[in-house]
Amino acid sequence: MFIIHGNIKTMAEQDYADGYVQIADGKIAAVGDMKDCPAPDGEVLDVQGNLVMPGIIEAHCHMGITEEKKGMEGDDCNETVDPITPQLRAIDAINPMDAAFNDALQAGITSAMIGPGSANVVGGQFVFVKTHGRCIDHMIVKAPAAMKVAFGENPKVNYSGQNKSPATRMAIAAMLREELTKAVAYQKKREKEEGEVDFRYECWLPVLRGEIPLKAHAHRADDILTAVRIAKEFHLRMTLDHCSEGHLIMEELKEAGFPAIVGPDMASRNKIEVQNMAFKTAGLLSGHGILTAITTDHPVSKIQFLPICAGLAVKAGMSPEEGLRSITINAAKICGVEERVGSLAPGKDADIAVFTGNPMEVFTRTCYTIIEGEVVHRADSDD
């Protein structure tokens, strides 16, 4: 397949005002100026000057694990009977038939990080998937991709009503430390080939080896800093998800070195800990040298509004370039999949979105969404 005559935004080293993308075997074979384009063979998409860019990436959501229109029958996001559940795997609850997947494709969103919610201190394993398919096993890019942990109101609210811990922020931190201490002890035994395999602690090994990060739900500044403190104590990688008051502690976050996934800012301030939530946060963090992505936290905000959320962050001060990076290459780097997605470069997956204009603008339409070289959405097929 060839995409020709595109205004190509690679999110890499060079852009092309009139360029082409060559696709072979689901991968990008070449990207360049039209004057250097080889004679096209096979399917050709002449996009007539429309914007061609990497498929958009949602760095944190619950699509398909909290299904739309299905109530508790389709809500598998939180196992609210035990505050420590690292053994849960998102892949066992994601329903690709959820309408949100089609909404994502229509918005040019080609991949997403999906996992459990924040009711538990430890919620379980996230997975990074493509947004097209019927069988989740065939959609996986990275599994496990992160281990969910949560600070602040959500675990407190869920378990204080059950007359059990955690009822305080102290208990949340203590329970996480206790769990990590047990996991470290288990790791040492496994390295010495001592003891039996324990399913609950086996899932901590990729975290302790630094292969995947903690995915820390934290809104309030003090909760963010508690997450940083614990990650540093145990020498762990971590992403700061939501990070609503991150703009109040930018120096500390820059020094800590952890990336931020900001949002969902297109939602109501329905909790005390999100009172300082604002679209300006993403731009302030990125402007301060902190690697930043933007999230809808679907279904808190609808996944199809992800590029609009980036646009609103730009309106609030983020640079337009960084706005696009926050939903492409930055998101890919934070999710640990930048070798496959996030930019248009030879060897990467041919996950591409073609728009009539900048996707951060509300009147822009998605012309084509392409995943691994297959056109999975085209504007002329819209209902």
Image (spheres, helix red, strand yellow):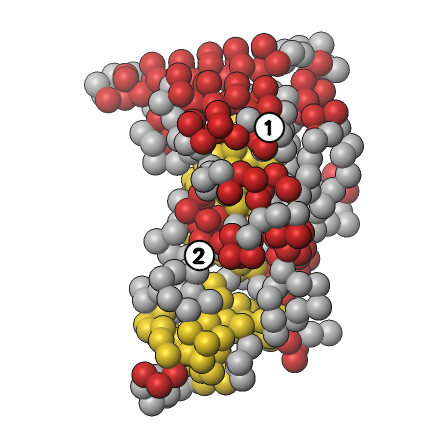
Q: Which residue is mark 1?
A: 248
Measuring 45% from the left and 80% from the top, which residue is drawn there?
A: 18
Q: How many marks?
A: 2
Measuring 38% from the left and 26% from the top, which residue is drawn there?
A: 236
Spot occupied by residue 131 in the image (x, y as percentages of width and height): 54, 58
Three-letter code, disc 1: Leu
Spot occupied by residue 8 in the image (x, y as percentages of width and height): 46, 72
Q: Quadrant of the N terminus?
A: bottom left
Task: State left or right for residue 340 relative to residue 307.
Answer: left
The reply to whether dot 1 and dot 2 touch (C-beta < 8 Å) is no
**Would you say residue 219 is visible in this rendering?**
yes
Spot occupied by residue 275 in the image (x, y as percentages of width and height): 73, 29
In the rendered view, tell whether residue 362 sits above or below residue 334.
Answer: below
Spot occupied by residue 229 in the image (x, y as percentages of width and height): 46, 18
**Would you say residue 217 is visible in this rendering?**
no
Task: State left or right for residue 371 relative to residue 382.
Answer: left
Three-letter code, disc 2: Gly
Under tag 2, what secondary structure? loop
In the rendered view, tell whether residue 192 sits above or below residue 204.
Answer: above
Q: Quadrant of the C terminus?
A: bottom right
Measuring 36% from the left and 62% from the top, which residue is drawn there?
A: 13
Pointer 1: residues within 10 angstroms few (<14), some, or many (20+)?
some
The earlier-in-sequence mark between 1 and 2 is 1
Under tag 1, what secondary structure? helix
Q: CA distance from mark 1 to mark 2?
A: 29 Å
Camera-nearest residue between 236 and 286: 286
Closest to the camera, between mark 1 and mark 2, is 1
In the rendered view, tell whether residue 161 sits above or below residue 58.
Answer: above
Q: Which mark is residue 342?
A: 2
